[in-house]
Image: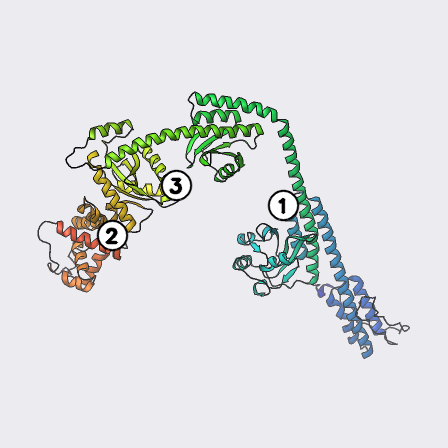
């Protein structure tokens, strides 16, 4: 109720005594008048009381603010009213305020009922379910004057109730809540079909709180919450809520109002659902009628199409030829994928991946299905999935077109089986050549590299180029897929792949086996969805050197497993000193350069002694004071040199793993230098400011 500014009204004159009227009968407070009690009769000669009573009646007639009703009593006291008169005025004031409150309640209830009837009419006029739900929460928020209103619908399959629509909500997490039956306030309403209200939900221990619900309510900032069931007959279909971001005690009138709105809303929701179901049923009926009418035409076209595709295959057509023919017949774009998702053919459409959900549905149902605007048909050979076909640019398919699309899957299956047979034969030849190249020659026998080179050339492999050997490993269940992927990669790299000594091996032209192993491990792991470990070695010195390269690649794979590097790819040099120890072609200089190269080059260019300082530092247990004594320099000089080393080698240069690598590289570097190893005690005091610093 808005407050009225008293100063805006003219001052009321003081009540003046009037001639005493005839005695009036006392106001009766019987059971039917709606008042708690009535004022006593005006005493004889009570002119001041009578004037005050008339003033109170005038205020009631004007609908004046509540604070104005105290003025007649105050004016009567000021005018010198007798105690009996003053008592009558005060009692009349109390009754007048009761009457005013009753009238306010009636007016408010009348406005609420009017709004409720308007809402019922509006809901009855709506036909779209989403529009009905949005209108319900909007009206709930308006009628109760809350910050937020929202609605959840029950999910009989999941056994819970989920957030369907909100009004005034700002939290994404809150808008996606699901409440189990009996959880929180809403879950309890949905379970018991009774309204519940909480002035401050967060601290209300009457409800079963969960982390998910409390987090969503807290993020939305809600405190006072009222929830009422949406009922259709005896069935609860959801819950309607009104909520404030401050503490609020919902009065019984508010509960009754929201419950009435929920009753109308439930009927509207059920009506909209029935209408949607009716529309769906009508559309299905029309579709069935059209299907029956076009059945004979479908059979004729299917026979004609089958003959055309059969003739195409017999004339030597491949998957691309079939896709082109079918795309023209269906007036759309066509993409054919193999079982691993690789594109085999594409006609009149952009590249798309195989829709996994559609392939699974088509495979289980044995029919073409539409998923996200794309028709999908699984290509099957019995229970085996050979691939899939996707048709774009067609929102729907007639029965005739659908049968044609499905027949395309059968023809494509035949072509893929034929293609696989040819590929298996070729892979067998490639695998045999690979085994011959990697098998060590028996003592006393000479390897016939010439015939191996000729065989490789016929398969598109040039053995004159430097080749690396990569040994691949994954879980046993995925080995067939890994073998197929390795064969595909080998063909793309102009290399060979196959099984050798029980392992999947790939021979590829490359000069950096470590980089190739890393990329293959990442690509194959992503393709298979599981870790793939790749050990590599090379390049080999011609075909004759490949057996030793293969042996080193096997050792690298074993080292990767021993070090716990499953899912990674590397060559032995990438494994640091471990690779140096395991390799049979130890590259000491390369190892030293990788680990210590920046420091050695800095010394050579600047004439500094960083390597000597680093040796002294590690030799004396990483002690600055002992290192400076051994070098005969100031401790600050040692610190400066070590800081320079840090900038050259990186922040983690002194970590345990790096320190071990550095100490080994230092030892190898000093052993490789000509002449005696310099003693740490040698040297002179370099604390002089003019001495070269790091």
Residue at the location (30% across, 35% down)? 497
Q: CA distance from mark 3 to mark 2?
A: 36 Å
Q: Residues within 10 Å of mark 2 (few under 14, many from 20)?
A: some
Observer-nearest of 50 and 222: 222
Name the quadrant of the N terminus: bottom right
- Chain-order first, disc 3 or disc 2: 3
Query: Mark 3 highlights which residue?
Result: 527
Residues at circles 1 and 2 in contact by the CB criterion of under 8 Å: no
Q: Residues within 10 Å of mark 1 (few under 14, many from 20)?
A: some
Residue 334, placed above or below residue 20: above
> Is residue 370 rendered to the left or right of residue 93?
left
Q: Position of residue 129 (x, y in %)?
A: 64, 45
Residue 559 is at least partly visible in this image: yes
Q: CA distance from mark 1 to mark 2?
A: 63 Å
- Dot 3 falls on a residue whose secondary structure is helix
Query: Mark 2 highlights which residue?
Result: 649
> Is residue 17 rendered to the left or right of residue 374?
right
Name the quadrant of the C terminus: bottom left
User: Which residue occupies the extreme bottom position in the image?
Assistant: 83
Q: How is the image coloured?
A: rainbow
Q: Position of residue 331 (x, y in %)?
A: 53, 26
Q: Quadrant of residue 189?
A: bottom right
> Is residue 525 rendered to the left or right of residue 581?
right
Residue 373 is at least partly visible in this image: no
Query: Mark 1 highlights which residue?
Result: 130
Observer-nearest of 33 and 493: 493
Residue 568, placed above or below residue 21: above
- Dot 2 falls on a residue whose secondary structure is helix
User: Which residue occupies the extreme left position in the image?
Assistant: 675
- Chain-order first, disc 1 or disc 3: 1
């Amino acid at each position: 109720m808005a407050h009225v500014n008293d100063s805006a009204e003219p001052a009321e004159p003081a009540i003046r005594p009037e001639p005493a009227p005839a005695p009036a009968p006392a106001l009766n407070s019987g059971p039917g008048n709606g008042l708690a009690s009535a004022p006593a009769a005006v005493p004889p000669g009570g002119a001041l009381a009578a004037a005050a009573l008339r003033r109170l009646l005038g205020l009631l007639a004007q609908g004046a603010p509540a604070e104005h009703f105290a003025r007649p009593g105050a004016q009567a006291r000021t005018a010198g009213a007798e105690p009996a008169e003053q008592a009558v005025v005060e009692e009349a004031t109390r009754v007048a305020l009761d009457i005013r409150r009753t009238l306010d309640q009636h007016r408010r209830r009348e406005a609420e009922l009017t709004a409720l009837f308007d809402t019922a009419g509006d809901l009855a006029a709506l036909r779209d379910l989403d529009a009905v739900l949005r209108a319900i929460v909007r009206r709930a928020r308006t009628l109760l004057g809350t910050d937020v209103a929202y609605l959840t619908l029950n999910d009989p399959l999941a056994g819970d109730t989920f957030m369907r629509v909100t009004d005034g909500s700002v939290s994404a997490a809150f808008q996606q809540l699901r409440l189990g039956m009996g959880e929180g306030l809403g879950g309890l309403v949905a379970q018991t079909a009774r309204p519940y209200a909480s002035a401050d939900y967060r601290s209300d221990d009457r409800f079963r709180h969960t982390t998910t619900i409390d987090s969503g309510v807290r993020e939305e900032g809600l405190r006072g919450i009222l929830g009422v069931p949406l009922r259709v007959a005896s069935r609860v279909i959801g819950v309607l809520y009104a909520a404030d971001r401050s503490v609020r005690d919902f009065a019984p009138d508010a509960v009754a109002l929201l419950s009435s709105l929920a009753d109308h809303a439930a009927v509207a929701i059920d009506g909209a659902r029935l209408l949607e179901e009716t529309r769906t049923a009508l559309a299905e009926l029309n579709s069935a009628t059209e299907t029956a009418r076009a059945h004979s035409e479908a059979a004729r076209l299917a026979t004609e199409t089958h003959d055309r595709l059969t003739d195409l295959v017999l004339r030597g057509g491949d998957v691309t030829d079939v896709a082109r023919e079918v795309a023209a017949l269906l007036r759309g774009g066509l993409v054919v994928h193999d079982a691993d998702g690789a594109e085999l053919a594409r006609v009149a459409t952009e590249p798309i991946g195989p829709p996994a959900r559609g392939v699974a549905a088509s495979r289980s149902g044995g029919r073409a299905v539409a998923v996200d605007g794309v028709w999908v048909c699984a290509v099957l050979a019995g229970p085996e999935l050979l691939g899939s076909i996707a048709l774009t640019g067609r929102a729907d398919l007639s029965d005739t077109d659908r049968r044609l699309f499905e027949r395309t899957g059968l023809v494509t299956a035949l072509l893929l089986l034929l293609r696989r047979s040819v590929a298996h034969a070729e892979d067998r030849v490639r695998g045999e050549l690979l085994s011959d190249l990697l098998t060590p020659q028996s003592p006393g026998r000479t390897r016939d590299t010439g015939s191996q080179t000729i065989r490789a050339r016929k398969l598109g492999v040039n053995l004159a180029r430097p080749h690396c050997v990569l040994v691949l490993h994954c879980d046993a269940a995925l080995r067939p897929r890994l073998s197929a992927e390795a064969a595909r990669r080998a063909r793309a790299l102009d290399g060979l792949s196959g099984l050798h000594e029980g392992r999947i091996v790939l021979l590829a032209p490359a000069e950096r086996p470590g980089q190739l192993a890393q990329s293959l491990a990442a690509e194959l792991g992503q393709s298979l969805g599981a870790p793939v470990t790749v050990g590599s070695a090379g390049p080999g010195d011609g075909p004759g050197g490949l057996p030793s390269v293969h042996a080193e690649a096997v050792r690298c794979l074993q080292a990767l497993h021993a070090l716990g590097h499953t899912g990674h790819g590397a060559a032995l040099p990438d494994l640091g000193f471990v690779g140096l120890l395991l390799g049979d072609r130890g590259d000491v200089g390369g190892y030293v350069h990788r680990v210590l190269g920046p420091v050695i080059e800095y010394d050579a260019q600047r004439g500094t002694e960083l390597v000597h300082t680093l040796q002294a530092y590690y030799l004396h247990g990483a002690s600055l004071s002992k290192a400076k004594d051994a070098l005969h320099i100031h401790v600050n000089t040692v610190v400066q040199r070590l800081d320079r080393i840090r900038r050259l080698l990186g922040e983690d240069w002194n970590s345990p793993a790096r320190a071990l690598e550095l100490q080994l590289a230092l030892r190898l570097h000093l052993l490789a230098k000509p002449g005696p190893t310099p003693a740490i005690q040698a040297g002179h005091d370099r604390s002089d400011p003019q001495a070269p610093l790091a």
